[in-house]
Structures are given as C-alpha cells and as structure tokens.
Amino acid sequence: MTLLIRSAALAGYAEMAHSVGVDPYAHLAAADLPAAALNDPEALIRGDSFARLLEATAAASGCDDFGLRLSETRELSHFGALGLLIRDQANFGDVLRVLDRYLSVHTEGITMPIEADGELVIIRVDVAAGRAMAIRQVVELSVGAVFRMFKLLLGNWWRPVSICFRHAPPNNLVLHRRFFACPIDFGQDFDAVVIRATDLAAPISRSDPTMSRHVQKYLDTLISWPNATATDKVRQLITVLLPTGTCTVERVARHLGVDYRTVQRRLAREGQSFSTFIDQIRGDLATRHILSGDRSMTEIASLLGFSALSAFSRWFRHHFKCSAKEWRRAAASTAAKSSPQLSSSI
C-alpha cells in the first residue's frame, strides 16, 4: 500500500537545500515529486518519494543531519487543522490524546503509540516505510518536528527526559545537542520522545476551547472512527509486542478492548489477515534493521519476536528467497550503483 502525506512536509525544503549547496528542483524531479507541491501544503505526495528525497539531499550535501535541520523550521501551522486543534487543548495530556486520534489526517506514514513506564511516558514516533529503504532523515525530521511542536505548546522552559533513536549517531552531534538540549540515546529499540508523567498536566497557554470544538468537528468529518484507525492500532501493537515474543491476535485484541474475532474482521475488510500483517511488518522492520547495519542478526531476530536465530533465518529465506546476509549484500550493491546516477543529474 502506498502511504500518502501532506506536502506540508516539504515546507522549508527548497531553502534548506539551497543553504547546503544542493539544487532542490533537480532532487525533487529525481524523487518523482512535482515542484508545484512546494506551494500547495494540502496536496498529497508519496511518503516513500519524500523519504528518498531527504536521503538523497543529505548524501549530496554531506549533511547527515539534514532532516533535523529541516525540523527546526517547523511551526504549528505546518500541521494544518491538526495544529490548530492541538494548540487549543487545555493541557499536554489532551494534546497527546488528540494526536493519537487525528494524526492519520495529517499523514498516513507516522503513528505515535504512547507507553506509560512508571514516572515516565514514552512517546514513540513510528515511521512506516517500504522494504530496502533508508529513512534516517525522515525519522530525524519526524522526531524533531514532534519535539518542536511540544516546545511551541509548552514553552522554552520544557525539556524532555531524553530523545531516542534506532540509528547510530551522526558524524557531528553539535546540532542534535543544541536542538534537543537533553540526553540523546542512539541505537535504541525505538524512536521516541521520553517525558515525565507529570508533564501531562502542564497547561497550554493559548488554549481556546470554543475554537477547539469547531476544529474537532471538521477533523471528525475527515475520518471514520474507529474503523479508519483499526489497522493503524493493530500495526502499533504488533510493533510494540513483537520483541516480547508474545504477539498474538488474542493479546492484541485485549489491548484494543475487543474480541479477537473483531480484530480479524477489521483486518479482513482491508484485505489482510493477522498472520500476513505480522509478516508484512516483520519484513519492513527486518529490512530496515539489516540495511542500517547497526545490529547483529541475532539482535534483529530477537526484535522481530523469534526465539532463535535459526527460526528467523528460515522465515527470512522463505519470504525473501535468499539469506539475510545475501539480501544485505544485494541491497548495499544496489545503493552503491544508484548513488552516482543522482549526483550526475544535478
């Protein structure tokens, strides 16, 4: 399935690309994105094309923090009607509830499962991506944009407990340290903003409940709840439960507060079954981890819920018709061949 995002994600891209010595229009064309999308924030563009655009721009400029640089330009207005709604919530906890419910209106490619862990709250930023695709820049843009949104709502006094990234640190951490001004942990099991549970009660100074009701009615016309988010919620839960080795349809159903047959029916309406959905998510996660090269095959097997490396190896060969190591070599070879083509076109 092709994931679509609002072209508001391109806000500031042309200017930022110019600032690092890259021709933005040549890269847009190479990524098969229309230049007109720069001026139409409500237009829909392909999420995978956007990811390729950012990765290619980062590579061409030599700035492996390009996505984070772009997140510095984000304002609440870039989130459209969703930005208006979160601005007018009473407190931070309400903001997170609104994001959980309406984020799919802004983008199909990002989900934000929220997990309570004692005195902490982990706000995950899960970026959906196709197989064999680098998404480091989109991840850093997304986490950075979420962090900036929270700062704009709560004020400069606010700091998260930490920021988590799955990928390895960049060559230079100056921007990351200045921008986040809190501990940053790389090589983690998820991408997330970690906050204190007490932050949930923090008031939003610009809250306007009357305007909030009007915007909420508008957003309610754009989604059909809960059916439109059933697959997203199942995806979130599978991603969270896979590393525990206890990801079953019954457990997912318990988390959703429904019978397991309800989960199966909702997935069937979208042409899915629970087992094929797990395989799809495992495939996306497996290729992402293998492509990054940051983890051993044993670690990847564990993160995908396999009790042994041999089980993961059999599963991978069945679905990809080669071993994981063979797939990694082929993906690296493909990336090496495609890189010069983009450079020669600008």
Image (cartoon, rainbow, N blue to C red):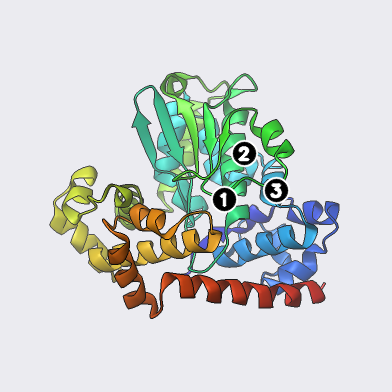
Look at 73% across and 37% down and name the residue there.
Answer: 174
The residue lying furthest to the bottom in this view is 321
Q: Which residue is mark 3?
A: 65
**For the image shown, how many numbered marks are present on the structure?**
3
Label 3 secondary element: loop
In the image, what residue type sits under mark 3? Asp
Look at 77% across and 63% down and name the residue there.
Answer: 60
Q: How dense is the environment of label 2, judged by Cα within 10 Å: few (below 14), some, or many (20 and up)?
A: some
Taking the image as drawn, is residue 276 in sight?
A: yes
Camera-nearest residue between 176 and 16: 176
Camera-nearest residue between 59 and 145: 59
**Which sits earlier in the primary sequence, circle 2 or circle 3?**
3
Q: CA distance from mark 2 to mark 3?
A: 22 Å
Label 1 secondary element: helix
**Which sits earlier in the primary sequence, circle 3 or circle 1?**
3
Q: Is residue 327 above or below residue 135?
A: below
Q: Quadrant of the C terminus?
A: bottom right
Look at 67% across and 69% down and name the residue there.
Answer: 33
Side of 297 where 279 appears, left or right: left
Residue 187: x, y in percent? 52, 45
Q: Quadrant of residue 274?
A: bottom left
Q: Which residue is mark 1?
A: 139
Label 2 secondary element: helix
Q: Quadrant of residue 197?
A: top left
In the image, what residue type sits under mark 2? Leu
Look at 70% across and 52% down and name the residue there.
Answer: 64
Side of 273 where 338 appears, left or right: right
Residue 111: x, y in percent? 44, 49
Q: Which dot marks residue 76? A: 2
Residue 333: x, y in percent? 61, 76
